[in-house]
Amino acid sequence: MNWACFMSDVAVGVKRGSDELSMYGSSPSSVTANGSDTKKQRLDESPPSRVLHIRKLPNEVSETEVIALGLPFGKVTNILMLKGKNQAFLELSTAEAAITMVNYYAAVTPQVRNSPVFIQYSNHKELKTDSALNQRAQAVLQAVSAVQDGSSPSSDHGVLDLAPPPSPVLRIIIDNMFYPVTLDVLQQIFSKFGTVMKIITFTKNNQFQALLQFSDPVNAQQAKLSLDGQNIYNSCCTLRIDFSKLVNLNVKYNNDKSRDYTRPDLPTGDGDSSKDHSLLGTPSGAIASYSSGAGYSSSLSLSQGAGGVSPLSAAAAAAAAAGRVALSGSGVSGVLLASNLNEEMVTPQSLFTLFGVYGDVQRVKILYNKKDSALIQLSDSNQAQLAMSHLNGQKVFGKVMRVTLSKHQTVALPREGLDDQLLTKDFSGSPLHRFKKPGSKNFQNIFPPSATLHLSNIRDGIGEDDLRLLFSNSGGAVKAFKFFQDRKMALIQMSSVEEAIQALMDLHNYDMGGNHHLKVSFSKSTI
């Protein structure tokens, strides 16, 4: 039976009798796992227990979402849902696991369905539930325990038939990649489920992908069941996980593209990320706003888009602690330095258009004494990191552009009348910013530079020949073209990524007449 279907179909199994409510009627004196609860905390009355009391759960929450809160910290041995009171009790196999969970959530607010919940030690040392009344909840626990133990659940209950995991190697695809994801971040996330031995990252079909090998196939199965469909960062960077047909990875180099954790003696190879337009961040790591663990999808409610869960937030905290992730507000600049530019061709407007694919550019300054270099200020450091990871090493106007973070915090505007060469431009009020609107679809359509461009806002009456001619005149050769059904959008493929970059800079916001301005962006598709 399909795991995702099973998990989403499980009804909330609760005891509704008065005996249950009298047993748990008053909130146990406890220590909360976050400091924001207004309920008085009586620390001395609540010694650590392997039973945890979870309060302020959203309506209609499922066992799977509650179990997922505890899954990364150890085996979950029992659960009791108090549905009418928006509460639950979760029993872990050891007090040590519960202490680890409470201590972790003291730093990272636990979230379920994007709402904060409160976790505290219970006065009860174990949960005693009526198995007949709590049968469905026990079925979920049995399935989860079987995965954790590496066995198959009993088929007598008709609950779940898990085939043995086919491989210790997982294939990971990341959708909606608004922030860079590095090899180190993947290692932090997946190591919650077992020993990660090897990782290889690459780009295929303009999507960041990875192959990750565990020491044991059971660990791979557990990670797949828990993480498939989750978001690494808020509302983006969604993990799509399948088993690979490979059973062993052959890693030749230890660098930011591949790593064999069993062979620290391997050479780094060239390791030059500029030669591979993958979506990896710089070696210093990704910049992301973790919002204290908010907004992660449920680890067991697969692809449901609900709930806030710990494996990824735990990874975020671990990565941050290791210095691999700069949390927002840490003083990292939103200003980029682009160098090795073609000073005969580059303009503030062309840089605004190109970097504007990845963030809202506020100001651009081409340096007066070094006109092959420019400072580009974006709205925040997240956008700057994203633009840098996509554009560093791309060929622009015939030269390989280098993009790094600048030491400047802002781009200063010249005093009036002093910029006679028009090297500096303020775009802060531009109507062309792609990411001004919260929740804009543009956030979901950010892709690395590619030879295929996505065109939208095409005026009625404009045909394929018109658009082919328009893009040919930008200095490139059109290799393929395809209209969408409504003919308001299309894909156009140039002969190279460099030509596509040139066309985007020239033709994004091109006036087609009748108040129709052409919108151009990079596509992940091919024609």
Image (cartoon, rainbow, N blue to C red):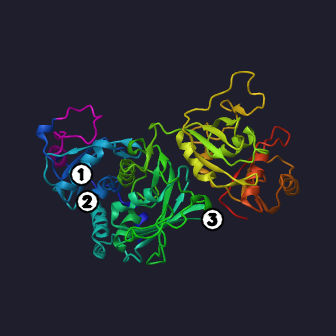
Residue type highlighted by circle 2 = Gly
Q: Left or right: 345 with respect to 73?
A: right
Q: Quadrant of the C terminus?
A: bottom right
Judge whether residue 88 can be spotted in this image.
Answer: no
- Residue 267 versus residue 296: which sits nearer the camera? 267
Q: Along the polypeptide, which appears first: circle 1 or circle 3?
A: 1
Task: Please tell me which residue is depicted at 19% across the width and 35% down the height of the picture.
Answer: 41
The disc placed on residue 205 is 3
Q: Percent from the top left, x then y, of residue 378? A: 60, 38
Q: Secondary structure at mark 3?
A: loop
Foreground label between 2 and 1: 1
Residue under pointer 1 = 100
Q: Are marks 2 and 1 in contact (CB under 8 Å)?
A: yes
* Location of residue 127 in the rendering, given as x and y in whole percent from the top left corner: 17, 55
Task: Name the residue tied to disc 2.
Answer: 74
Front residue of 275/206: it is: 275
The earlier-in-sequence mark between 2 and 3 is: 2
Q: Quadrant of residue 373?
A: top right
Q: CA distance from mark 2 to mark 1?
A: 9 Å
Residue 236, how many percent across, how many down?
51, 50
Mark 1 to mark 3 CA distance (whole Å):
41 Å
Left or right of 272 on screen, residue 132 = left
Asked which secondary structure carries label 2, the reply is loop
Residue 410 seen by the camera: yes
| 492 relative to 192 in the view: left or right | right
- Image quadrant where residue 136 sits: bottom left
Q: Which residues are magenta?
A: 19-41
**In the rendered view, would you say 457 is above or below 166?**
above
Contact check, label 1 and label 3, Cβ < 8 Å: no
